[in-house]
Structure formats: structure tokens, C-alpha cells
Amino acid sequence: MYSFKRAAICFFSCAVAFSFSACEKEALTDLDLMPASSKTINQRGEIGGYIPNPGGENLPQPTIVKQIYIPKNPANAGFKTLAWKITWPTYPAGADEDQIPTVFSTDDGALNSFNYLNSVDSTETYKMHFSLYFDNRVLVSNDTDLWAPLTYLDFYSVGSSDIDNTALKKINTSPAIVEDWVKNNPGILASEMGNDANSDYEYDDWEPYQAGDIYIYQIYKHDEDKPFKYGVIRIVSMSPRVIEVYLAVPNINDFSITTPSPFGPGN
């Protein structure tokens, strides 16, 4: 049985594609990539719209490259992949970690700092799906290590219908396989989430991630009849810090499409 982390648990379309390394754990090339913005915080509303540093942080901000992958094979084109490549600058020693954008939402690609989220309405925090930079770990809302830095995150909020549940699974696979999933068959992520054969059984969620680490995640709500959502997180590089986030979404205007949970609703 695969292991989860500690948990009870469009944006702008481009015709270009990421360059993957088929066998090496190295950063992707930036050839043919179109930078989205010099700022990373996504304005709530229209996906892909950015505003300059709404949190007012003094630190340099990450950059995000956004793409969409649509499978060429019609048999797999019921789903497409939304992709974000996030590159953080190198921060000086002693930099205020509360000002570094780390909390990510797949709803609109927003990447926000603790400082910003604690200064606005709690609904902004509740849109989170995971933290990517803080503590050199991928953390979800049920991880209690996020409850101290995030004012509105606690036992009661993570158990309510206000916030999505995110399950995370570290896997043993190659960048080439991830490339095939996200570009050619994103619908397969649901079954890969439940595939015991690809689980990293030595994974300890207390340990920091490193370049080459890959995770599959599932987003769901216990008390709502909504489709499960699946995606992949890839740690491309530690210096500079580069992380890719992928999310499979329906590719047609038919919201009856659902992807089954491999472990049953609400689990």
C-alpha cells in the first residue's frame, strides 16, 4: 500500500513544450519557454493574470513559466495538463522565510508567501494545495508544520469543507516517464496514484527533498461530490530552486467527467 505524508488525509495556453531530460536528474532547458512574468503572485480571478508582489515583500520574487499540454492521440485527449515551472532566486542567508512565496494553488497558479496570506482574508489560505519552498519539503494543509506559520491553518480549518484535502505520494520513476504522462496521457495519473509498484517505500516526509524527487498528488473533498484531481510535482534543481507542478484537468466542456479515487471516496 502506498504511503501518504502526515495527513488524514486557464491560465495562458502555449504551443511550446518543456524540454525533459530522459535519464538525468537535471534542470530543464529554457529553450522555447516563454516567461510568464517577473513576478509570481497570481491575481485571483482570471487564470494567468499576475500582479506585482501584492504582499509587499522586499525579497526578489520567483518566476513562473506556464503551459498547457494536450495529448495528440484522441483516445487520451479527454484530459489535458496544466503545467507550471517555478524558479526561485537565490536568497541571502538570514532572509525572512515568511516573505518567500511558497504556498501554491492549482486553482489559478497562485504562489504566495506566509506573510501575504496572513495579511488577507482566510479564504486565500484555504485555496492552498501545498507548500513548495518552505523547509525544503512539499507540505500539504494537514502537515502540522504549516499550522504555525499560517495564521488561518489549524485542526479545525483543515477538517472543514472550506479547504481542499491533498494526498501526496513520493514515487520512483524517471523524468521521461513523467514527460509521457503529462504530454501524452494525463488521465493515467489517477491509476498511478494507486499503483503500489511505483511507491518509494523509503520515503520519510521529515527529510528534505532533493533534485530528482517526484511526487504524485490527489486533491479531493470529503464532503462534496466533486471529481478528484491528480497531478505531479517534480523537484528539478536545488540551486537554483526549480520545481515543476502538473495538473490533469478535463479537456472538454463536459463536467460530468470524473476520475475515480483508487482508494475510494473520502479516504
Image (tube, rainbow, N blue to C red):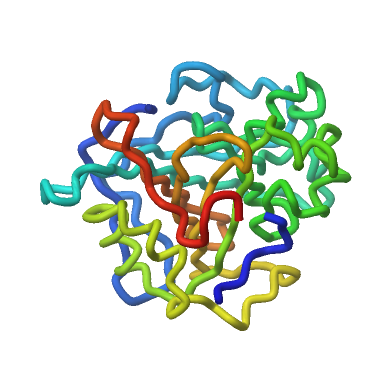
Q: How many marks?
A: 0
- Residue 218: x percent and y percent? 52, 52
Looking at this view, is 256 or 126 the one in front? Answer: 256
Q: Is residue 143 left or right of residue 27?
A: right
Q: Which quadrant is home to the C terminus?
A: bottom right
- Residue 11: x percent and y percent? 38, 28
Q: Is residue 141 left or right of residue 26?
A: right
Looking at this view, is 101 or 216 the one in front? Answer: 216
- Residue 20: x percent and y percent? 31, 61
Position of residue 195 relative to residue 129, above or below, is: below
- Residue 146: x percent and y percent? 79, 48
Image quadrant where residue 3 sits: bottom right
Position of residue 29 relative to residue 55, above or below, is: below
Could you tell me which residue is drawn at 38 percent across and 63 percent down?
191
Q: Which quadrant is home to the N terminus?
A: bottom right
Could you tell me which residue is drawn at 70 percent across and 23 percent down?
123
Could you tell me which residue is drawn at 25 percent across and 53 percent down?
183
Image quadrant where residue 170 sits: bottom right
Position of residue 262 relative to residue 250, above or below, is: below
Q: Is residue 266 left or right of residue 244?
A: right
Could you tell me which residue is drawn at 66 percent across and 33 percent down?
112
